[in-house]
Image (cartoon, helix red, strand yellow):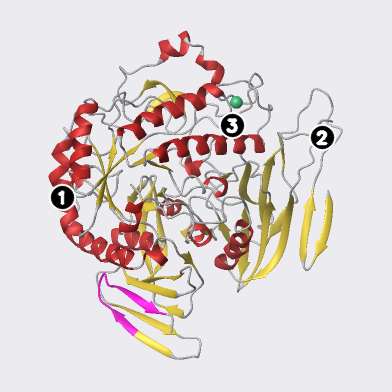
């Protein structure tokens, strides 16, 4: 490995030659950087968060995996949106990154070692070999000290991103995004949870037009355009990719709803399930593609593990959504199949399709198939295959006005194609403390929406929704029974939600600010605070994926923004049901103290 040092920054450039015949280099994990265990780590996983308890989980190197266990590990580009880690204490940190503009798949992970220190890992897959069989990546790893914490580390990464192709200018957004529509997320079959019990009878929002009065009601209450964002709408089975069309009940039924929405200025969106393959639906077991799979020899095109094994990862299992496999996106058949299916939705007049739901961060997984046209080890070729698919799929969808999105914020190489996604920062409560690092880096190119909050079983709703507002997200509500709201998608409708009227008022207020300040909250850049803001720390109990935790949060959440003209603004909000004090120290030392009323959101001027 070549090591060079310039201006206080170390560059590491590895190479591996002379690999013996019959052996393969799967991945490279170096340099091995360790930091003391009393540091805080910024980890760009699940939209970004801080970890300080390194006993919270075991090390999970990236590999071909068989069963989703709630913690899939930090595969980049995908579950991890950025290829760096930062560790800091008392305003001093180290920043460790891969300066890799081909976005080679990596495990962006950390490992607690025996002496209590923490190893930072950028485990890089080595499928891109030179003609002589050696691995000589064009990129280097960088290690440097810096002053600050997570924001300053994200700033270093943002400065690098700014020079990447595709980031020269903001995306061409459809006109409706400037109106900041609120998403109304709901299933048309079943009563909330799609796991057990599996009652998939049509609910009160089917036929689709039954929901017109509900959409109108929330449009009125929120003073906003609405996007009806449907789940369990597929005519095949819920969450049973790749075949979803025609919609449940037929095209004519959905067309009536589409036309009723559009006539009122509202929008129609759908969730899909990405690039998995369904053999049998676990939700509706009568739905099977096994015969087609046999007849068309489709096993040829599925992703394989290192031993040729074939399984699937996300949402796969008898007690999950389906039994199936994952499609290899370097296979022409898979690309054609996905583009065909997306084309049907785009031509129909759907406005937003979360086509890459379950492809977290817009990424895909690791394929080792020796019989595919790609190298037998994952490498940058895999990122290039996904970029090529997204380019084609998003360009043809855009011709019909349909925007494509994914689950979680999109990872770095996919942002030019996926600029409106179901953000998932709250899921990180499972391990750590969410901080808006991914929004800090990418917001000017990618403005997401607070999604269905899948996985969050308990956590103060007002804190959650305000966190998403300060994350720069457009806003959503999840419908429950009979026009009411649910606390989150994974809560049963029978539970009810006693504070839903207050939540509607809060979303109306926050969205009025989004509509007032699109140059900041849609197109703007998140920046460091222009004034020091202090409020009390309090504890919030939460439950994510069955795990109970308590997190610490400020009584008043703040965020700071800059628009293209260089103007700045801040926002502060009190998520509690009682007044909270906010103390602001301006750069000249002037101190201002405010008492924010319960659920109050205010603007902060830069002066
Ligand atoms: Zn493959």
Vertical order, 318 against 167 (above or below): above
Element assignment for label 2? loop
Badge 1 vs badge 2, beta-carbon distance below 8 Å: no
What residue is disc 2 on? 134
* 142 horizontally vs 133: left or right: left
Q: Nearer the viewer, mark 1 or mark 2?
A: 1
What label sits on residue 158 in the rendered view?
Answer: none
Residue reaching furthest to the top: 295
The residue positioned 32% from the left and 52% from the top of the image is 176
Badge 3 vs badge 1, beta-carbon distance below 8 Å: no
- Expressed as whole percent of the image width and height from the top left, the position of residue 424 reads 42, 50
The residue positioned 78% from the left and 26% from the top of the image is 23
What residue is disc 3 on? 64
Element assignment for label 3? loop
The residue positioned 65% from the left and 57% from the top of the image is 116
Name which quarter of the figure residue 600 lies in: bottom left
- Expressed as whole percent of the image width and height from the top left, the position of residue 564 reads 48, 68
* 257 horizontally vs 516: left or right: left
Ligand 1, what quadrant? top right
Q: Nearer the viewer, mark 3 or mark 1?
A: 1
Beta carbon at label 3 within 8 Å of ligand 1: no
What residue is disc 1 on? 216
């Amino acid at each position: 490995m070549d090591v060079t040092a310039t201006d206080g920054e170390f560059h590491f450039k590895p190479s591996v030659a002379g690999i013996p015949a019959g052996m393969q280099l799967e991945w490279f994990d170096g340099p091995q950087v360790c930091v003391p265990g009393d540091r805080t780590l910024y980890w760009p996983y699940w939209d970004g968060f801080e970890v300080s308890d390194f006993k919270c989980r075991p090390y999970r190197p990236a590999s071909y995996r068989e069963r989703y266990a709630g913690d899939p590990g930090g595969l980049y580009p995908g579950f991890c949106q950025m290829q760096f880690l930062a560790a800091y204490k008392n305003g001093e940190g180290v920043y460790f990154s891969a300066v890799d503009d081909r976005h080679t798949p990596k495990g962006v992970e950390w490992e607690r070692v025996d002496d209590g220190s923490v190893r930072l890992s950028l485990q890089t897959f080595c499928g891109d070999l030179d003609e002589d069989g050696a691995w000589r990546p064009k990129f280097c790893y960088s290690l440097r000290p810096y002053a600050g914490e997570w924001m300053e580390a994200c700033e270093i990464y943002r400065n690098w991103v700014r020079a990447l192709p595709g980031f020269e200018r903001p995306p061409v957004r459809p006109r409706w995004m400037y109106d900041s529509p609120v998403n109304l997320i709901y299933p048309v079959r079943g009563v909330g949870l799609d796991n057990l019990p599996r009652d998939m009878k049509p609910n009160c929002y089917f036929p689709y037009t039954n929901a017109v009065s509900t959409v109108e009601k929330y449009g009125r209450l929120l003073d906003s355009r609405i996007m009806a964002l449907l789940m369990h709408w597929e005519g095949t089975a819920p969450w049973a990719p790749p075949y979803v069309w025609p919609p449940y009940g037929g095209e004519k039924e959905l067309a009536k709803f589409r036309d009723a929405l559009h006539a009122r200025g509202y929008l129609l969106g759908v969730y899909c399930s990405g690039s998995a393959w369904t053999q049998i639906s676990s939700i509706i077991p009568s739905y099977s593609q096994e015969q087609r799979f046999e007849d068309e020899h489709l096993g040829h095109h599925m992703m394989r593990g290192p031993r040729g094994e074939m399984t699937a990862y996300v949402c796969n299992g008898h007690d999950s959504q389906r039994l199936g496999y994952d499609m290899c996106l370097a296979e022409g058949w898979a690309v054609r199949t996905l583009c065909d299916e997306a084309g049907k939705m785009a031509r129909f007049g759907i406005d937003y399709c979360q086509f890459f739901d379950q492809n977290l961060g817009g990424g895909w997984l690791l394929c080792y198939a020796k019989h595919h046209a790609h190298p037998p080890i994952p490498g940058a070729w895999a990122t290039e295959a996904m970029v090529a698919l997204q380019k084609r799929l998003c360009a043809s969808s855009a011709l019909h006005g349909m925007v494509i999105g994914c689950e979680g914020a999109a990872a770095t190489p996919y942002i030019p194609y996926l600029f409106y996604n179901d953000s998932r920062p709250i899921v990180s409560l499972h391990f750590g403390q969410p901080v808006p690092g991914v929004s800090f880096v990418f917001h000017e190119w990618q403005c997401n929406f607070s999604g269905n909050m899948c996985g969050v079983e308990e956590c103060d709703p007002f804190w959650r929704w305000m966190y998403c507002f300060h994350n720069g997200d457009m806003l959503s509500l999840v419908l429950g029974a009979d026009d009411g709201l649910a606390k989150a998608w994974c809560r049963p409708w029978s539970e009810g939600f006693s504070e839903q009227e207050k939540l509607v008022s809060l979303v109306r207020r926050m969205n009025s600010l989004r509509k007032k300040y699109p140059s900041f909250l849609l197109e703007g850049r998140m920046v460091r605070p222009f004034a020091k803001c202090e409020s009390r720390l309090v504890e919030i109990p939460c439950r994510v994926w069955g795990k109970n935790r308590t997190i610490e949060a400020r009584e008043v959440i703040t965020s700071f923004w800059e628009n293209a003209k260089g103007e700045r603004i801040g926002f502060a909000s009190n998520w509690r049901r009682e007044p909270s004090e906010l103390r602001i120290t301006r750069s000249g030392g002037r101190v201002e103290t405010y008492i924010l009323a319960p659920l109050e959101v205010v603007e902060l001027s830069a002066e």
